[in-house]
Image (cartoon, rainbow, N blue to C red):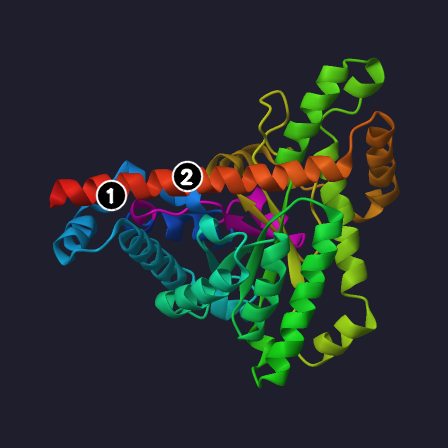
Amino acid sequence: MSNQRTAELSAAGVSIWLDDLSRSRIESGNLADVIESQSVVGVTTNPTIFANAIGAGIGYGDRITAHAASGSTAEQTVFDLMCADVADACDVLAPVYAASGGRDGRVSIEVSPDLARDTTGTIAQARELWEKVDRENAMIKIPATAEGLEAISEVIGSGISVNVTLIFSLARYRQVINAYLVGLERARAAGHEISKIHSVASFFVSRVDTEIDARLSALGTNDALALKSQAGLANARLAYEVFEQGFASERARMLLDLGAKLQRPLWASTGVKDPALPDTLYVSGLVAADVVNTMPEATLNAFADHGEVQGDTVTGSYRESDLLLNDLDGLGIDYNEVTEKLELEGLQKFEASWSELLATVESALKAQA
């Protein structure tokens, strides 16, 4: 039976995606179980997730042995393992994909973090991953760096569905929406069926609070401390306003009338980093129509246990959210500096995980050899 709390969240307009994947999760039947029991309708991955999964070694031994015998490099092996996991997860989610008309049932795989500043390399690898996974319900994750924007447009223009990741600022989010619309226009001009192209824009939440709360604590005044743990929700809620405005434009409406799909906001980094905060804060506080919330397993289980759906907690809060960001600015906390720092740190974390993953697989290949 489906959990009542997650079912209510889904009914309120939130697509629940699981922010985790591993060979053992697929083969044990756990992925199929959370789809059935907790209303999960998609999966996201990133370099850190695969570093943890492959680094644990469970379920990958025989595959690594085969790659060692064939002389594969560590990078070739990693991509083969990731693509196999994503393809198999796509198959598990195929019924959801069919039932939702392609809206959900998606599994995301990310281009190498080393390509985050390389437009041409990102485009080439996105196409390679799309062909290698070879599943219509896959999504290619591309970071929303300045260099990534053109890659997003070009990849979508090729008819490939894209999960745009690592979005922190409202200004960058506006650029991401534009990149999606440019991509749809290119796809249409190239003869692709734009109704089959789907995209989500992954807006990160908890990391904003982590960074800003540290600055507020350093200030230490009563006014500063009173604003703690509010910026993440406020920023995301204003992002939803940007989403509404972006797809109400004449340009967007024309494409939607031709069959294009909304690029839905996806709330990422929704596990709380501060144990003093409610563990479902970034789920209950971001309920609105046409959104995705990708949750780590702990957050998903917490919501299934005691989460509450209190209706739309986004669209009525724009003025309050805007005032909150203004108050932060009044305390000397520079929004642009914060979001630029978070983007850089996000890339660095994924690069570190990627390097660790390659080193782990390299060692395993040498041991087999």
Q: Which residues are magenta?
A: 1-25
Query: In the depicted view, which residue is nearer to us: 95 or 282?
Result: 282
Query: Quick check: 35 left or right of 273?
Result: left
**Is residue 302 positioned above or below 242 on the image?**
above
- Is residue 52 visible in the rendered image? The answer is no
What kind of element bears circle 2? helix
- What numbered label is drawn on residue 186? none
| Residues packed near mark 1 inside 10 Å, few (<14), some (14 to 19) or many (20 plus) | some
Dot 2 amino acid type:
Ser
Q: How many marks?
A: 2
Q: Position of residue 83 (x, y in %)?
A: 35, 58
- Pointer 2 or 1: first along the chain: 2
Query: Quick check: 169 left or right of 204?
Result: right
- What numbered label is drawn on residue 362? 1
Q: Which quadrant would residue 212 be assigned to in this image?
A: top right
Task: Identify residue for label 2.
Answer: 353
Q: What's the CA distance linking mark 2 and mark 1? A: 14 Å
Query: In the depicted view, which residue is nearer to us: 223 or 360?
Result: 360
Residue furthest to the bottom = 191
Dot 1 amino acid type:
Glu
What kind of element bears circle 1? helix
Query: In the depicted view, which residue is nearer to us: 129 or 75?
Result: 75
